[in-house]
Image (cartoon, rainbow, N blue to C red):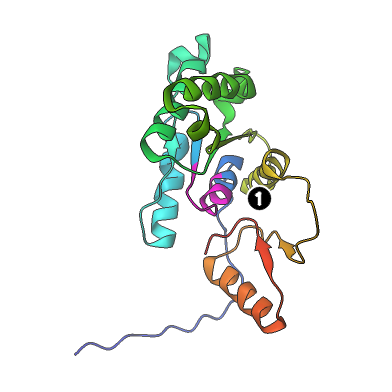
């Protein structure tokens, strides 16, 4: 019978922590929404590393879609890729939210993501019907990879979600709004536990637990 070796660390700091580009933070934020799907508007590699990292970290498959921009998109733009990507995701998975996340390539070529999303919404209404299409919220999230880090991408995603999905309250709901930032699922569960001990209800945006 083998015994486990428990190694005690002499340090508490993390040396060379992972610091990557903005889209990763946005993907993390969208992953914390029930039936939410990140759609990365960029090349295949923009999602591959993040999907691999999430799968290793959470020990389960991570669903991240990508529009797969190629060389021709640098000249003609990625309009077709984004619209077809949104329609395919909506038709096959019927998510509650699609987070359309930009990357360095789509930002540099100047793709009008908000305009493309409007076109995609109209095509979805024709294909799925207005009632079903309106159930799927499509949120454009600007995350240029050439500035800041994944922390900024998370912040941009949260801001985009609030700006696009928040409704004017008719009356106070007596709940605390909590934006936890990029933390582990266990941290979210601990926050919920503390709230339950206090007898307080909270809304966690986004809930990765």
> Relative to 76, is 84 above or below?
below
Q: In this orientation, which residue lies closer to the viewer: 146 or 175?
A: 175
**Residue lying farthest to the right in this orientation:** 171
Counting other residues with Cα less than 10 Å from the Cα at mark 1, is it few (<14), some (14-19), or many (20 or more)?
Answer: some
Residue at left offset 65%, top offset 56%: 205
| Residue 172 in the image, given as x and y percentages of width and height | 80, 60
Q: Nearer the viewer, residue 132 or 189?
A: 132
Helix, strand, or loop for circle 1? helix
Quarter of the figure that contains the N terminus:
bottom left
Q: Is residue 68 visible?
A: no
Magenta region: which residues? Answer: 27-37
Does the magenta-highlighted stretch encompass residue 32? yes
Residue 57 position in % (x across, y down): 44, 60
In this view, the residue in front, 162 or 25, is: 162
In this rendering, the answer to whether 47 lies above or below 119 is below
- Answer left or right for 186 relative to 174: left
> Which residue shows up at 70% across the image and 80% down it?
199
Q: Quadrant of residue 44?
A: top left
Is residue 73 toward the left or the right of residue 14 in the image?
A: left
């Amino acid at each position: 019978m083998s015994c486990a070796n428990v190694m005690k660390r002499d340090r508490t700091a993390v040396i060379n922590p992972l610091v990557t580009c903005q889209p990763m933070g946005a993907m993390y934020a969208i992953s914390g929404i029930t039936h939410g799907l990140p759609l990365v508007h960029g090349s295949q590699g923009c999602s591959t590393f993040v999907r691999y990292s999430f799968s290793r970290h959470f020990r389960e498959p991570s669903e991240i879609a990508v529009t797969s921009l190629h060389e021709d998109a640098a000249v003609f733009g990625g309009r077709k890729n984004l619209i077809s990507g949104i329609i395919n995701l909506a038709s096959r998975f019927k998510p509650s939210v699609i987070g359309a996340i930009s990357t360095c390539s789509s930002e540099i070529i100047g793709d009008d993501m908000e305009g493309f999303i409007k076109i995609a919404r109209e095509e979805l209404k024709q294909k799925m019907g207005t009632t079903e299409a309106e159930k799927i919220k499509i949120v454009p999230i600007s995350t240029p990879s050439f500035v800041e880090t994944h922390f900024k991408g998370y912040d941009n995603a949260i801001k985009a979600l609030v700006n696009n999905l928040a409704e004017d309250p008719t009356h106070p709901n007596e709940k605390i709004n909590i934006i936890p930032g990029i933390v582990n699922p266990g941290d979210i569960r601990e926050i919920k536990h503390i709230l339950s001990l206090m007898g307080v209800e909270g809304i966690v945006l986004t809930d990765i637990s």
